[in-house]
Image: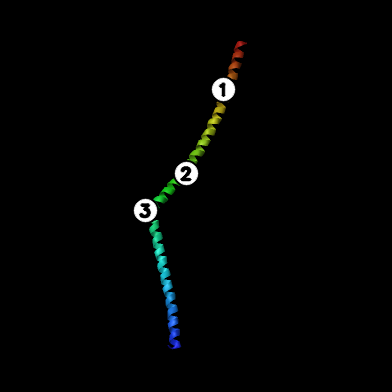
Amino acid sequence: MDPVVQIIITIIGVLGSGAIWKYLEARLRVNSDEKKLELQNNDGVQYRDDLKNRVRNLEAMLANSSNEKDTLRQQVLDLVAEVNTLRVKVEFLEKENQRLKNK
C-alpha cells in the first residue's frame, strides 16, 4: 500500500473513532438522564418523599408540643407557688383578724 493511503486511512480511523466515542458518550448521557427522570416520576419515589416530608412535619410538631408542655409545666409550677403564697397570706390575715376580734 501507498504510504499516503495508509496516512489517509489512519486519519479517517482516528477521526471516526473520536466521532463514535462522542456519539456513544451522548447516548449514555441521554439514557442516564432518562433513568433519572423515570426515577423522579416513579410512584414509589414520590411516596417515599411524601413520607419523608410527613415525618419531618411530625417531628417538628412533636418538638413544638414538647416546648409547649415545658412552658405549661413551668406556668403550673408558678401558679402553685403563688397559691401557696396566698394561702400563707390568708392564714396570716385570719390570725390577725382573730387577734383583732379578741381585743
Label placed on residue 43: 3
Residue 47 coordinates in the image, percent (x, y): 39, 50
Mark 2, secondary structure of its residue? helix
Q: Residues within 10 Å of mark 1 (few under 14, many from 20)?
A: few
User: Quarter-wise, where is residue 27 in the image?
Assistant: bottom left
* 23 left or right, relative to 78: left
- In the displayed structure, 7 sits above or below 83; it is below
Query: Residue 34 versus residue 82: which sits nearer the camera?
Result: 34
Do the residues bearing badges 1 and 3 touch, measured as CB atoms within 8 Å?
A: no
Q: Name which residue lies at 43% across and 83% down.
A: 9
Q: Earlier in the sequence, mark 2 or mark 3?
A: 3
Query: Residue 93 versus residue 88: which sits nearer the camera?
Result: 88
User: Quarter-wise, where is residue 16 in the image?
Assistant: bottom left
| Image quarter (top left, top right, bottom left or bottom right) of the C terminus | top right
Residue 66 coordinates in the image, percent (x, y): 50, 38
Q: Amino acid at mark 1?
A: Arg
Q: Residue furthest top?
A: 102
- Between marks 1 and 3 in the image, the one whose residue lies nearer the viewer: 3
Label placed on residue 87: 1
* 5 left or right, relative to 71: left
Mark 3, secondary structure of its residue? helix
- In the displayed structure, 48 sits above or below 68; it is below
Q: Name which residue lies at 43% across and 80% down.
A: 12
Mark 1, secondary structure of its residue? helix
Q: Residues within 10 Å of mark 2 (few under 14, many from 20)?
A: few
User: Quarter-wise, where is residue 4 in the image?
Assistant: bottom left
Do the residues bearing badges 2 and 1 touch, measured as CB atoms within 8 Å?
A: no
Mark 2 sits on what residue?
A: 59
Q: Residue furthest right?
A: 103
